[in-house]
Amino acid sequence: MRMRHKKNLETRLENAGEYLITLRSDSLNFNDAKNEKHLIDLEELFGNNNPVYLEVGGGKGQFACTFAQQNPEVNMLCVEKISDVIVLACEKAQAMGLKNVKFASCAAEYLEAFLPPKSFEAIFLNFSCPFPKKSYAAHRLTHERFLNIYKPLLKDGAPICQKTDNMHFFEYSIEQFSKCGYEISNVSLDLHNSDFEGNIVTEYESRFVSQGMPIYRLEARVRK
């Protein structure tokens, strides 16, 4: 279902300017984005050299804002490509008065062009679209082309943390992680009935759990 275009979107985006980074990718090609370097200075962006975490496909910002609020000693960078969604995330951060979260308007295909290597303590993939049709597999954020984009961005030993409600997508993701040289750990097939501590419930997650659906979670690290 398409999201309705937000009223006064441009004005609202301007008003959220302190939280929003627009990464221009007009001149880049998906296939050679990693060869075009327009790297942002994360220390300059956040005004400190605290550890930085990355969320890809952050939606309305529930996870990013909660994570930033609970961990004031770290920075959170959240990537979301849909303007009608990212404006809500920026407004949420603004309303909460957060200083350690930023939202980047960018498609995940271009991350290597803008984000410096070995910069992130973890990457979060929360309830990414599963794109169930086989012909759309390359759009899944755990497809091998994306997993190879994330690899150089992670610090040594840093995890990719994935959560989803979709069992088939979860199984697919495990296959892709293994294929791309990641080691999988801390797998949960029913997160909310496990002993996992510190889970931040996202908008989608709350809805799925209320319907009695299990939540799947894993961590994946590049094999040494």
Image: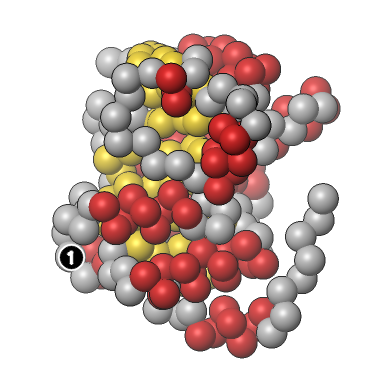
Residue placed at 29% from the left, 46% from the top? 119
Quadrant assignment for the C terminus: top left
Q: Position of residue 11 (x, y in %)?
A: 61, 87
Side of 32 relative to 21 (left or right)? right
Residue shown at 69% from the left, 84% from the top? 8
Label count reads: 1
User: Up-down: is 213 above or below 141?
Assistant: above
Q: Position of residue 30 (x, y in %)?
A: 64, 47
Task: Find residue 182 and report its horizontal and vertical position in percent.
Answer: 41, 18
Q: How is the image coloured?
A: secondary structure
Q: Nearer the viewer, residue 127 or 24?
A: 127
Q: Is residue 88 visible?
A: yes
Q: Kindly indicate the quadrant of the structure image that contains residue 222.
A: top left
**Who's the residue at 27% across and 40% down the image?**
121
Is any part of residue 143 visible from this angle?
no
Q: Amino acid at mark 1?
A: Asn
Q: Nearer the viewer, residue 115 or 186?
A: 186
Residue 24, horizontal then vertical, whole percent: 57, 67
Mark 1, residue position: 48
Residue at image location 64% in from the left, 67% down from the top: 83
**Image quadrant of residue 161?**
top left
Crowd class of label 1 (few under 14; some 14 to 19; many from 20; radius 10 Å): few
Classify 3 as above or below 130.
below
Up the image or down, 115 lies above or below 95; here it is: above
Find numbered disc 1 in the image and state the secondary structure of the residue it sits on. Answer: loop
Q: Is residue 160 left or right of residue 176?
A: left
Task: From the viewer's side, name the closer residue of 200 and 154.
Answer: 200
The foreground one among 191 and 118 is 191
